[in-house]
Image (spheres, grey):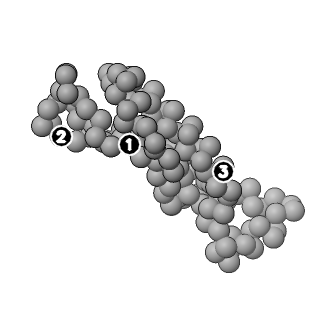
Amino acid sequence: MKNGKRILNVRIVKMDDQDPDTSYLDQDGWEERKAEYRNSYFDFCGVRAKAEVQFEENGAIQHLTSPGLWGIETDSDSAYFADIGRQELAELKSILESAGFSKRAIAKACKGVTL
């Protein structure tokens, strides 16, 4: 920890979307999908990347997060979730770099991170 800053943990998380915009389900032709939602066959979630960091040795742990993508149907394909996770991780890497972390430290902390 040369300058006192360090990345403690990086992960991609799937979180419940507490206030999804379901208005698209009101369109003509979406009746079956709307019924599936009403019957709890799927719900909505968001995906974001999170990092726990310290800016000073023995300093408070802080959290940096990507903006996230919300309103994702929970029964979406796993490849879609993986793609969104990669995009959110790329956003987080930019945020970490803006916060003064080196590309090397970021790459090391993000190595092997998947949803």
Which percent across, then down, holds residue 99?
A: 34, 25
At horizontal 66% and vertical 50% (from top left) the residue drawn is 79
Return the disc, 3 or 1, that comes first in the chain's sequence. 1
Instruction: Determine whether 102 is above or below 71 in the image.
Output: above
| Left or right, 94 with reference to 36 | left
Q: Secondary structure at mark 3?
A: helix
At horizontal 75% and vertical 61% (from top left) the residue drawn is 25
Task: Name the one closer to the observer, 110 or 22.
Answer: 110
At horizontal 50% and vertical 33% (from top left) the residue drawn is 91
Task: Name the one closer to the observer, 14 or 1.
Answer: 1
Residue at the disc numbered 2 = 60
Return the disc, 2 or 3, that comes first in the chain's sequence. 2
Q: Are marks 3 and 1 in contact (CB under 8 Å)?
A: no
| Left or right, 35 with reference to 104 | right
Instruction: Determine if residue 99 is in view.
Output: no
Which percent across, then down, holds residue 54?
A: 23, 35
Which mark lies nearer to you, 1 or 2?
1
Q: Which mark is residue 10?
A: 1
| Left or right, 105 with reference to 49 | left
Task: Name the one closer to the observer, 92 or 28.
Answer: 92
Return the disc, 1 or 2, that comes first in the chain's sequence. 1
Q: CA gap, disc 3 to disc 1?
A: 20 Å
Which percent across, then down, holds residue 28?
A: 86, 61
Instruction: Determine whether 44 is above or below 9 in the image.
Output: below
Give the total of numbered labels. 3
Which percent across, then down, holds residue 111?
A: 43, 37
Residue at the disc numbered 3 = 79
Tell me the kind of residue under disc 2. Answer: Ala
Tell me the kind of residue under disc 3. Answer: Ala
Image-quadrant location for residue 65:
top left
